[in-house]
Image (spheres, rainbow, N blue to C red):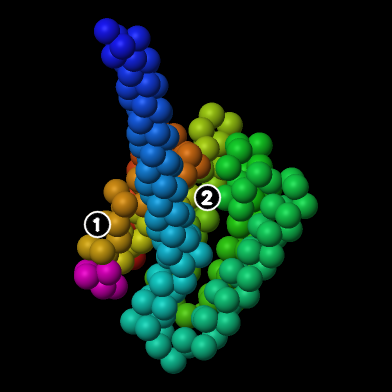
Amino acid sequence: MSAEPDEPRDAAEASTSAGTDDRAGRANAASASAATQGKAYALARAVSIVLHPFAIFLLLTLLGVDKLAPRAMTHALLGIGVAIAVTWLFVLQRRYSGRWGTVDASHRSERPLLYWVLLAVLAVCWWWMRGLGGSLSAGIVSVAAMLIVAAVLNAWIKLSLHMASLAFAAVSLIGLSLPWACAAAALLPVLGWARLRMARHSAAEVIGGTVLGLLAGAVLRAVVG
């Protein structure tokens, strides 16, 4: 008889314990999910940095000059180095002055000035490298044309310049180094995932940037052979 009053209390304690365990389990699951998401974002950011357009065009310059005008390597590297430094300083100034939300100019309203700066830098690069061979000059003009198309389309869609640059490299490298061209093509879906994971672009912007880069590279190949 004396044990009967303890039964409801025991049941209540068991229920409370189960509820506590359930909440703890949900909290642990949420924590694990957040950690996984954080790692995925960090990986996406690393991929975006490694495959940044600056890195892609630096590689294109190295491979192109090495094959077409190896004696002018120092001249070419000086030009591309200054171009990247000037553009990067501009990007950092816009970002840390609060005019841009990210270093990627992630809003369409931030892109027009970026395109003007990139085109101006390309014009100087073309002048600097004009004596290194027609193929190199044609490559610079192709990139400029790609940026002009992206700038025009920016009124409706903010194309991914990361994807456009890598796709352009995948096609244009075919005539310079097939292994590098294959590597660039294989990395396209990886970079696409990274840009989507970081929420820098929509799927349409990623695909659109890829198509633009492929077309620009194909035109360059058709012109220079």
How packed mark 1 is, by other alpha carbons closer than 10 Å (few <14, some 14-19, many 20 or more), is few
What residue is shown at x 66% (from left), y 57% (from top)?
91
Q: Earlier in the sequence, mark 1 or mark 2?
A: 2
Residue that numbered label 2 is attached to: 147
Q: In what element is the residue under mark 2?
A: helix
Which amino acid type is shown beneath numbered disc 2? Leu
Where's residue 118, x and y in %? 61, 57
Task: Answer left or right for 162 relative to 100.
Answer: left
Which amino acid type is shown beneath numbered disc 1? Ala
Q: In what element is the residue under mark 1?
A: helix
| Vertical placement of residue 13 versus 64, above or below | above
Q: Which residues are magenta?
A: 176-180
Task: Answer left or right for 49 relative to 183.
Answer: right
What residue is shown at x 34% (from left), y 14% (from top)?
6
| Vertical placement of residue 71 versus 141, above or below | below
What residue is shown at x 27% (from left), y 7% (from top)?
1
Q: Nearer the viewer, residue 135 or 187?
A: 187
Task: Answer left or right for 193 relative to 162.
Answer: left
| Vertical placement of residue 78 versus 116, above or below | below
Report which quarter residue 62 is drawn in.
Answer: bottom left
Residue that numbered label 1 is attached to: 186
Can residue 213 be seen here? The reply is: no
For residue 32, the mark is none
